[in-house]
Image (tube, coloured by chain):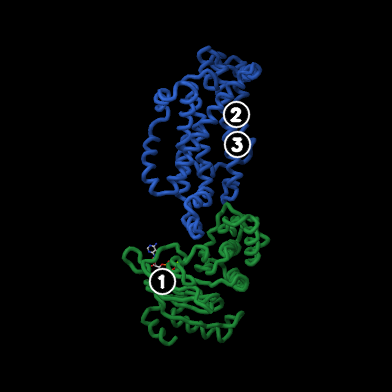
Amino acid sequence: MSTLLEIRGLAKRYDDRLVLGPLHLAFETGETVAVIGRSGCGKSTLLRLVAGLDRPSAGTVTLAGQPIRPDDVAIVFQEPRLMPWLSVADNAGFGLQHLPRLERAEAVAEALDVVGLAGAATKLPKQLSGGMAQRTALARALAVRPKLLLLDEPFSALDPLTRAGLQNHLGEVRDHYGPTVLLITHDMDEALVLADRIIVLDGPPGRIVAEFAPRLPAGIKPTAPAFQRWKDRLIDVLGPASQPTGTLTKLEDHRHAV
Amino acid sequence: MTDLAYLPGLGERARKSRARPSALAGWILPLALTGVWEAASRAGLIAPNHLPAPSIVAITILHLAQSGDLTDHLAATLGRLGLGFLLGAAAGTVAGALTGASRTLRLLVDPLIQGLRSVPSIAWVPLFILWLGIFEASKVALIAVGVFFPVYLNLMSGIAGVDRKLIEVGRAHRLSHLDLIRRVLLPAALPAYIVGLRGGLGLGWMFVAAAELMGASEGLGFLLVDGQQTGRPAVVIAAILLFALLGKLSDIALARTGQALTAWQDTEGDR
Ligand SMILES: Nc1ncnc2c1ncn2[C@@H]1O[C@H](COP(=O)(O)OP(=O)(O)O)[C@@H](O)[C@H]1O
Ligand SMILES: [Mg+2]
């Protein structure tokens, strides 16, 4: 395996307030990394810097040793953010305008197929359920065949059943397209189910306070003892999910134990 | 059309809340009034030199049509309006798109345009006549000025109000500034733009009438003056009715087109 994404000394300040970093991180090609942490700790900031939507105050992000190029990354936001005037297919092809029509149609059809929306290609966003809309957004990101797929809490606004379905789709996506994935989440189950590696962020300023590589077998049930053990360790670091007040002191106790 | 169309918010709300229980319901009152008017005229309750009966007005229109004069007058009015509308709407579109899309341009240009807007459009007429002569060009210019402002204002505020999150999707896909305008901002602002176009068209009708009243040898506005000067109220009323009819028809056509183009909107009022 080779290093795909490398983040060095990345930091972001708004006005004079440091909200993220300095942060060091490296991703292997094809790896799925979940970044988990409580609300406001700087997760989205990290993602936006990697996506090139904001400029870092310090540090670099490189992809395979090069400055990150627009075509290499695609992002799915917490909300679908579909263009309401475009059909599902046209939304999915939004990033492919530079391609010849036929090529674009093929890439769109493939992406819609992977997310299970082949039958809804001509629908308008207003006709979609929340899950379908978010799958369309996922298809839009996949259609550009990014080396790096960035997901910012993409399933958090969905009901649990839809979320579970979409998490399955993400599995299929990885099998099909094989992108390296950076998944931002605050859902421990989601992180444990989907990620090869889990990075715990706390802040602001957002810093890495723990790192896990559970490597649970694919398709493991959340009730399985191994799953529960990892979850307990996550809870120790994060604090109970219901009251996400994990203090730094508490976290310090664990960072060396990991 | 009223000046309310100047105010994007108001125009939009008015458009959205307008119920349409049945297209026929709107005809009841005008037809009833026409009936009463005809009856009152025949009973001698209304002096024919003030308000001739509807049947007389209808015959007047018929005569105008048979002589071919009506076609000439309509062609003149519609030609001026069409050209003025195109020019004004085009200028309003460009200016609105640019100032809507660029904060810098908006800060730089919008105050000037707002200042110009507070000049009553008719006040430009003497200047236009000095610059462009008394014939077609100055009339078209007046109409274009009237059309410009609602188109400009609605498009600008429509674009400036586009959801920042959608714009970010465009930026995440590295759209050029021009592509961002073309593929995100303009489509998203289309509903507001159509409100602006409808407001512009309404003002266009107002100013074509004004321009023709101030001096023309043909056109519906000329018919108004001619009817007045030759003491033929039936001609004046015929011209008024034609203005009403054409204004309404053109607005319906624009509104229908707009509804078809913005059927993607997830709103109650447009469905
Ligand atoms: N544009 C901004 N201007 C100022 N502060 C910001 C901005 N964006 C985020 N922040 C601050 O940065 C911190 C991290 O925000 P964010 O990355 O969105 O957190 P998360 O995604 O983990 O919930 C928060 O304290 C937030 O208030
Ligand atoms: Mg966030």
Which chain letter matches label 2?
Answer: B
Q: Position of residue A191 (x, y in %)?
A: 52, 76
**What residue sits 54% from the left and 19% below the top?**
B218
- Which numbered circle lies on residue B253? 3
Q: Residues within 10 Å of mark 3 (few under 14, many from 20)?
A: few
Which chain letter matches label 3?
Answer: B
Say what amino acid the circle numbered 3 marks: Ala
Q: Nearer the viewer, mark 2 or mark 3?
A: 3
Q: Report, in whole angstroms, how far the alpha carbon at label 2 lies from the one at label 3.
A: 21 Å
Residue at the spot of label 1: A41
Circles 2, 1 touching at the beta carbon (< 8 Å): no
Q: Quadrant of residue A19?
A: bottom left
Quarter the N terminus of chain A occupies: bottom right
Say what amino acid the circle numbered 1 marks: Cys
- Furthest residue in direction top, as rendered: B230
Comparing A178 with B228, the one in front is A178
Q: Position of residue A229 (x, y in %)?
A: 52, 86
**Placement of B116 over or under A54, stated as above or below:** above
